[in-house]
Image (cartoon, rainbow, N blue to C red):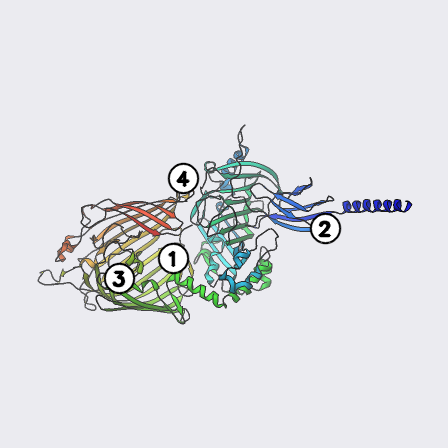
Amino acid sequence: MQRNALLFFFSFIFLCTSALHSQGQVTRVNGRVYDPLTNEPIPFASVLFIGTSVGKNTDMDGKFSLETMDVVDSIRISFIGYLSTTMHVQRHKTQEINIALRANKFDLPEVVIKAGENPALIILKKIIENKPKNDRSELQAFQYESYNKLEFDINNITDKFKRKRIFKPFQFIFDNMDSSVSNQTPYLPVFLIETVSDVYFRSDPTLRKEVIKASKIAGVENETVSQYLGDLYSNINIYDNYIYLFQKGFVSPIAGLSTLYYKYSLMDSAFIGNNWCYKITFHPRRKQELTFNGEMWVSDSSFAIRRINMRIASDANINYVEDLALVHEYEYINHEHWMLSKEVLVVNLAPTETKSKQTTGFIGRKTTYYSKFLLNQPKDAAFFKGSEVDLLESAKKQTMAYWDSTRGERLTKNERAIYAMIDTIKTIPAYKRWADLVKIFATGYKGVGLVEIGPVYTFVSSNSVEGIRLRFGGQTSNKFSEWLVLDGYGAYGTKDQRFKYGGTARYFISKKPRVILGGEFKQDVEQLGKSPNAFADDNFFATVLRREKSNKLNDITQGKIYLENEWLEGFSNRITFTHSEYNPLGSLDFTYYLNDAKTDSSNKINNSELSFYLRFAYKERFVSGKVDRVSLGTRFPVVHLQYSHGLKDVIYSTFIYDKLRFKLDDNLYLGNFGILSYSIEAAKIFQALPYPLLFIHPGNNSFVYDKAAFNLMNFYEFVSDEYVSFKAEQHFGGILLDRIPALRKLKWREVATFSAVIGQLSSKNRQLLSNPDVFYNLERKPYAEFGVGIENIFKVLRIDNIWRLSYLDHPGISKVAILGTVSLSF
């Protein structure tokens, strides 16, 4: 009995001691809460030990520290606008956990303020009133150093995704995935580009210049990409009324009329550094408008933006963008002006849209740090002469020590691994096969050693003159030469049983600036009077989508030689000598008199011409490959001017004449009302010519809408020796259809078009022709057509309904037609 009592006593003491020991051990958790899209901290997020009342809010850097002596095994993290998450913790240990909170794509509950004026709107009025004072573009001058980092990743990579057959040869690259945060789906870095620049701005006159003094690239062979990562080509000004992203005008939350688009709430106030700031949240008033959700911290004295964090509305009418976030932080420089000190722009691209789960897609993340500010000390105007962006020759030769000392933030382990990983990927045969397939789809060419075979979509076509047309051709690749490009083809028609052929040559005398010497020759069948935007005559799709038979063709033998010189980016000219021989085919007849006495005539035209062409696109941007380049456009109108002179008796040429043509193209960005694209053209010929050498207004005989043609005008229907034309397209971006509940989810977008041309054909030109009734004259009234349509059908299709408004009595015309085209846009 005594023994049992002792055993009970010691067991009781052991249990009590164990319980006290257990209660005396501390569970401590330190960490950081952040947005996984932008990697930016989430201040004031709630972190709580589940089952207890122990909790804290994160600080301005998203950091927290919790501890408890209670028995716990998990924490819950939550914040308004984000999905709450629960994380497991280890008991009785000190641990560090970084938590990524995903944004909640569903609408937030509406906050209703019933009594008095909304205090957020009072502060907003002050922000708008002080915009001229706080906008850096109002300064006399400023300069700074910027560090830019652009990273492109595959995100939300699941085990199922990795097991796909297409990725079997690339399994090794998944070792480089970043999975450092336990609740964040890993992502795979694909390429990384870094630049360091000195940027200069002067307001009177408005001048800008950027000098890129360091550049480091992994994953992209195109070196000129570096030029477009600088501050000038990606700068977003929150003080502008519209923020343009993917050529769409999003309403700024501090725009002059922002209260028509946003609801505001004053949520908090706190010190950020030495500045007392107000926290204001903003959300869209209506669905699917181009607006943002987010929050901004506003300085209480200057009413300048101290920090803003926003992302596009989840239902905004924009394609392929699963999410887009923008973060701006500002610093008060020399007690003088608020300047942007950090910018983060993140775009999450996904092929499909879903709110129920994350989908595998791509993330582009651009981070910029600004430093070394110098205000109101303008450079001389001479400093800004030349290119707006200069890439120094030493930019790609900077040492690792330089980069480590200059970067605004350290590269992660996975980012550093990209440089070696990309070189390995390029050696894998499977990568080369997929790269070939993408190139065939995009360009129509298949690389074979030193040459590229194609375009594949011209191999088989047909028309009423040639019957089935068989063609084979190709061009030299960059492996052959980066300075000389040769191109050639041969074709055969089964009906006319004739061979045709052609070839071109381009030699780059210089690439900076671009100076090109080129030549072309062809003996072929061709359609005159089509727009430069139309399918090539022997394109397979031109055959399939043709509305009418192609029976007004020409047998053309043509040779030309030209010299092209680009004086500045966007400013170039070309001098061309061309000799052409035309013979009509099919139902064509352009017989003309050879002399004033009209004693004899000819149905063959022999012509030599010298032309001077000038093109000016102010501040046009290009991305250049080793040979060719792609224009990224310009904010300003593009001007074209061409003068041509006929050379009589040069290689049996018959005519002497002078032609002058002017054209202006422009895009007007109208904010929420979309984009207006328009073109104005005028031309005149000063002597008499047969009509194939006159201005043949471009028609369209296909089911494909052609923005550069008159879509309901027949080929050769109208000819002029002087004219003025106007074309316009208004893309409304869904401003009307987004307000119809039944259609809203389709994200269709309205488009309207108008085209008109007025001109005349002088009597001397009509008298030159033995049969002047083969075409019509525009001198009675203008030709015009109008259309309305819907684009973004299934994200790729556009359908237009076009009405012809004049000359409705002409035979063989279409008064109305429904045309379609493939149109890919965000």
Using a 10 Å C-alpha cutoff, classify the residue at mark 3 as few (fewer than 14 neighbours), some (14 to 19) or many (20 or more).
Answer: many
Distance from label 2 to label 3 (Cα)? 78 Å
Q: Is residue 74 left or right of residue 484?
A: right
User: What is the CA distance from the residue labelled 1 to the residue labelled 3?
Assistant: 38 Å
Q: Which residue is mark 1?
A: 570
**Observer-nearest residue: 429 or 345?**
429
- In primary-sequence order, the first of circles 4 and 3 is 3
According to the image, label 4 marks what residue? 742
Vertical position of residue 666 compared to residue 176: above or below? above
Q: Earlier in the sequence, mark 4 or mark 2?
A: 2
Instruction: Name the residue nearer the viewer: 384 or 803.
Output: 803
Please state which of the two labelled residues, at mark 4 or mark 2, is closer to the viewer.
4
Query: Which one is earlier in the sequence, the residue at label 4 or at label 1?
Result: 1
Asked whether the viewer can see residue 151, the reply is no
Q: Are there few (<14), some (14-19), or many (20+) residues within 10 Å of tag 2?
A: few
Report how far apart the C-alphas of labels 4 and 3 lie in the structure. Answer: 44 Å
Q: Which residue is disc 2 drawn over?
A: 93
Disc 4 element: helix
